[in-house]
Image (cartoon, grey):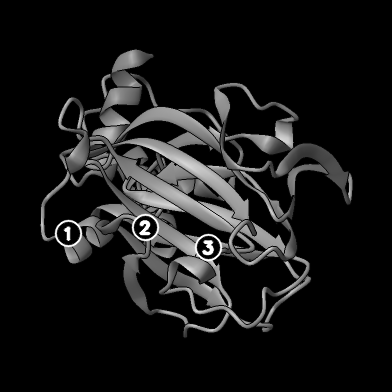
Amino acid sequence: MQQQLHSSLCACCCAPVINTGQALKTNSYFDKWSTPVVEVISCTFFIVLLLLNPLAGLAVERVDVGNFSSGILDGWEEKVFKGKTHYQLVSENLKKVLRADSQAGASGLVREIKIDLNKTPILNWSWRVDNQLKNLNERLKSGDDYAARIYIVVSGGFAFWKTRSLNYVWASKIPVGSHWPNAFAKDNVIMIAQQSGPAGVGQWHHQQRNIQADLKRYFGEEIDSIDAVAIMTDTDNSGQKATAWYGDIFFTSK
């Protein structure tokens, strides 16, 4: 049986058919055809399916970072900077998500996790904000507040001054696609406006970024891995209020 299966698979890869077993007995229309002809037809059909679905048989590798829909916060630690943002898992439409409420506070959730960007470079996440922060100049320290943001951290180890970060944010008014150095950390932290302004407020948005490509673009280096992912909804500098929601966060190979 194993030899017959091996031979059939070889045929589907355009290798010669080697049939060491007896022809199958059947009452189907294909009785009048010889076994090799039936195998060619079957394999041709298999190849057509592959062409119609190019992803068939190609598993997409996935690494979960924030599996909030499962109702767990394992591995996440709170980091308080000034005041506290309240984070909690809540149910929405029969699904668990992470809710963040900030009133003139700035604290985040951090998960230290090594991600091999050569295998899984694509960051996937979803978020929603319930209100827009207003009248901010995000390029200044007084305006360094965001209703929602996702940090990607590359540790510098003992050379802490070499630690770098990308921040994907829901900006107040800076246009989508813009980037700028963080007002506090300068060139070591690059801010990227993933979304901006009132457009889409109150709605869920699914996001995807090629982190390896972004690190190359903004820091000019080929970086093979990251060391942490963080979430933060903060309003400490402006004294405003913000509510955001975060869905699952994960990396994929494509």
x, y percent for residue 72: 70, 26
Drawn side of residue 221 relative to residue 60, left or right: left
**In the figure, 240 relative to 161: above or below?**
below
Classify 19 as above or below 106.
above
- Write down the residue under mark 1: 219
Q: Residue at x 75, y 30 (%)?
A: 71
239 up-or-down from 188: above or below = below
Q: Which residue is mark 3?
A: 207
**Image quarter of residue 211:** bottom left
Instruction: Name the amino acid, label 3.
Output: Gln
**Of label 1 and label 3, which has the lower sequence position?**
3
Q: Quadrant of residue 27?
A: top right
Q: Mark 1 is on which residue type?
A: Phe
Q: Nearer the viewer, residue 89 or 96?
A: 89
Residue 105 screen position, x and y as percent: 67, 50
Q: Nearer the viewer, mark 1 or mark 3?
A: 1
Within 10 Å of disc 1 (Cα), the crowding (few <14, some 14-19, many 20+) is some
Where is residue 28? Give x, y as percent. Answer: 59, 44
Q: Is residue 76 left or right of residue 113?
A: right
Res 184 label? 2
Q: Residues within 10 Å of mark 2 (few under 14, many from 20)?
A: few
Q: Residue at x 70, y 44 (%)?
A: 85
